[in-house]
Image (cartoon, helix red, strand yellow):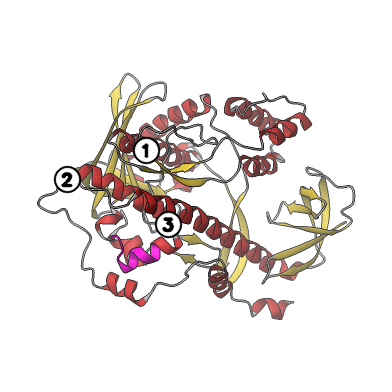
Amino acid sequence: MSKRTNRIDLAELAAQVLLERGLEPEFTPEALNQVARLQEPAKPKPEETVRDLRSLLWASIDNDNSRDLDQLTVADDLGKGATRVLVAIADVDAMVKQNSPVDVHARKNTTSIYTAARVFPMLPERLSTDLSSLNPDQERLAVVIAYTVDSEGVTSDPEIYRALVHSKAKLAYNSVGAWLNGEEPMPAAMQAVEGLADQMRLQDAAAQRLCIQRHRHGALVLDSIETRAIMEDGEVLDIERESKNRAHEIIEDFMIAANGVVARFLDHHGSPSFRRVVRSPERWDRIESLAADYGEELPPDPDPVALQRFLLKMRKADPVRFPDLSLTIIKLLGRGEYAVHEPNQDADGHFGLAVRDYSHSTAPNRRYPDVITQRLLKAVLGGRTIAYGPVELAELAQHCTAQEDAAKKAERQIAKSAAAMLLAHRIGQTFDGIITGAKPKGVWARIFHPPVEGRVVEGEAGLDVGDRVRVRLVDTDVHRGYIDFAIQ
């Protein structure tokens, strides 16, 4: 097993999996040549209306190792508990013209794909991590989405315009979150910029108000387990569980609000919009039944507020099993999808976020739907004809949904292969775990350390979801991502 495992290159396997799922792992020579001809970041043209906001205390917050920076944020204290929030989004469209070779590749995959062994960016790295990335100490063109958050977390006074921005710092979720919680000192990048600490506190307070307001309307608290493989020289050293903190919540809540502003802006100006929707769950009866298994009652019709109350109660009662309940609810809610919304139509909305108007507009270096939305926005701002016809937009919505699903499946498949590689040398060892799935076709268990899931192939009779178990590892298959356990 050891020799067989060492011959498997996860990066090569990831590229193979992408091809099998209809995705392109490599850029075409034409796309690379297009990027090679670029001399500098995009600059405003003389005839364009672009505000100069370079003096503001812009900063990014992202993962420690992120280099494709899509957003900057800054805020202004208006007094009486109100905050003006500005979100700057990288102007990718200024450098990636529609139907150019780079655009054709981005349109094919529709998303950056993050596997344990290799990142497959949607845009060539010279663009996504440099020329169109909102890097620190660099001047960049951006689309700015502005809104006011009042003392109750209600947004008002939306505004969208183009601007020149200049990031003062690149911050990371983990260090900012730990600082906000009083667990670690101020990050060095924050300390180096006068006034940035006060900025982060102001943004944190505004984000918390936004979050509370969304939860009042039924935004769901879900806690599915996210993991990250730690790799070195092609080998998996460990798998860590990733947790959200207050810094994640700043960006999450600011971007949800910004995406709502964008959707309503396009509608107000008579433009179609490219929306992200999660419709009211068709399997609400199964969610009702699931709640009844826990001794709780939900109303007969889909009700996000009632579901939110149930989830909060379950998280408090049993935090260990709550991630598995969360995953079940996510599956029953149904998948998100892209849809074209025409002005003055009734909006399907996003059930899980409890918002009616929701686009994807804040990550154009990483997601093609955000590039489409940016082009729609810039057409309105520039008084130009929309670049996409209704039939093309509808086809793009279906295509983006399908390719995003394919990308997620590829990411999950390689994550399973990474877990199998980590455990390949531990055959016969025992682990504490919990049953996460129990159906006629099979029983699955998640072990706690490392946090990976596998199939129970011996002693599974009579087990049910939530049962605590002790399991022995009996086999792994890195290529297929299989992990097999026996009840000890």
Label number found at residue 263: 1
Query: Foreground: 272 or 456?
Result: 272
5 horizontally vs 171: left or right: right
Residue 2 appears in the rendering: yes
Q: Amino acid at mark 2?
A: Val
Is residue 430 highlighted in magenta? no
Q: Residue 50 — which label?
A: 2
Q: Neighbour class for label 2 at 10 Å: few (<14), some, many (≥20)? A: some
| Residue 122 appears in the picture as rendered | no
Residue type of the residue flagged with mark 1: Ala
Which residue range is magenta in the image? 98-106
Q: In terms of secondary structure, where does tag 1 sit?
A: helix
Mark 1 or mark 2: which comes first in sequence? 2
Near mark 1 (Cα within 10 A), the count class, few <14, some 14-19 or many ≥20, is many
Select label 3 or label 2 by which is in front.
2
Residue 83: x, y in percent?
32, 28
Residue at image point 69% right, 37% down: 319
Residue 50 in the image, given as x and y percentages of width and height: 17, 45
Residue 202, horizontal then vertical, whole percent: 36, 32
Residue at 51 percent of width and 35 percent of height? 353
Question: Earlier along the polypeptide chain: callout 3 or callout 2?
Answer: 2
Q: Is residue 105 magenta?
A: yes
**Residue for badge 3:** 66
Spot the residue most to the top: 80
Whether label 1 touches label 2, CB < 8 Å: no
What's the magenta bit mostly, secondary-structure-wise?
helix
Taking depth in this image into account, of 140 and 233 the one nearest to the observer is: 140
